[in-house]
Amino acid sequence: MTLAEQWRELTANLPPDWAEARLALELEDPAQADRAALILGPLTPGRSRRGFHLTVPRDRDLGRFLARLDEEGVGGSLMLVETEQQTPVSRSRAEAPQRLAEQWDELVSRLPPDWSDLYAELELDSSDYLERGALLLAPVNPARYGGRSTFRFRAASSRGYGVAASMARRCLERLDAEGITGTLRALRVLSRSAHVATQGPVWYVEGKAV
């Protein structure tokens, strides 16, 4: 049975409200450990004598990593050590995260009516959202900055450099649709910028043009 199949079988028997699983992966050939460590790297596994210890949150796609091990011919046995169940939260706390499209609407409503250029920052609530978030945000040309889960991007109200405001909102709606949460901030704003044979103004952050 492949590692991906073993994981599917394990998850089918986990409690409905499991939040985190701790697993032991024992390799058939310990000589493949270095190759396996490269593939499993984003999961930050712990090494053992014959394999790895893994702690996997429910929203982490472990099956994708195990499928890559299968493709590389890395075999082994996957064993469940223990699970951690979700902690019940109050309804008000569960509803606390505000949708990103709503945050965008509020942000824009606070800008001057004649705003022309915006430099914004989106901090995702979890590094697990990073890869998928970057893909869904691709049209805004996001740039990684600061923390592991932070993106920055430019937007333009009508013309010039930066994504159109309507497209920025649409990308945030796509994040909302997949349950990706975070905090949106306006870092710099200009009004009525004059584009004379240029794409618009340039901001410098730590000596780099953005």
Image (cartoon, rainbow, N blue to C red):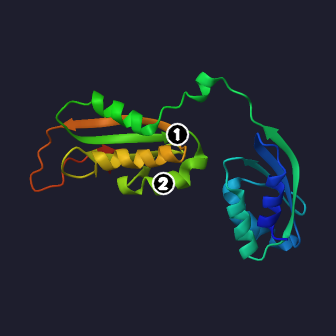
SS at mark 1 in the image:
loop
Residue 121, can we see it? yes
Q: Nearer the viewer, residue 54 or 166?
A: 166
Q: Residue at coordinates 18% horizontally, 54% vertically from top-left? A: 199
Q: Residue at coordinates 55% horizontally, 43% vertically from top-left? A: 179
Q: Percent position (x, y) of residue 146?
A: 48, 43
Give the quadrant of residue 138.
bottom left
Residue underneath mark 2: 134
198 to 172, vertically: above or below: below
Q: Nearer the viewer, residue 82 or 34?
A: 82
From the viewer's perspective, tell me whether residue 99 is left or right of residue 56: left
The quarter of the rendered structure image containing the N terminus is bottom right
SS at mark 2 in the image:
helix
Q: Residue at coordinates 40% horizontally, 39% vertically from top-left? A: 101
Mark 2 or mark 1: name the one nearer the start of the chain: 2
* Type of the residue with mark 1: Thr
Q: Residue at coordinates 69% horizontally, 59% vertically from top-left? A: 41
Q: Percent position (x, y) of residue 147?
A: 52, 43
Residue 207, can we see it? no
Q: Residues within 10 Å of mark 1 (few under 14, many from 20)?
A: many
Q: Percent position (x, y) of residue 149?
A: 53, 45
* Type of the residue with mark 2: Ala
Q: Residues within 10 Å of mark 2 (few under 14, many from 20)?
A: some
Q: Tag on residue 79?
A: none
Residue underneath mark 1: 181
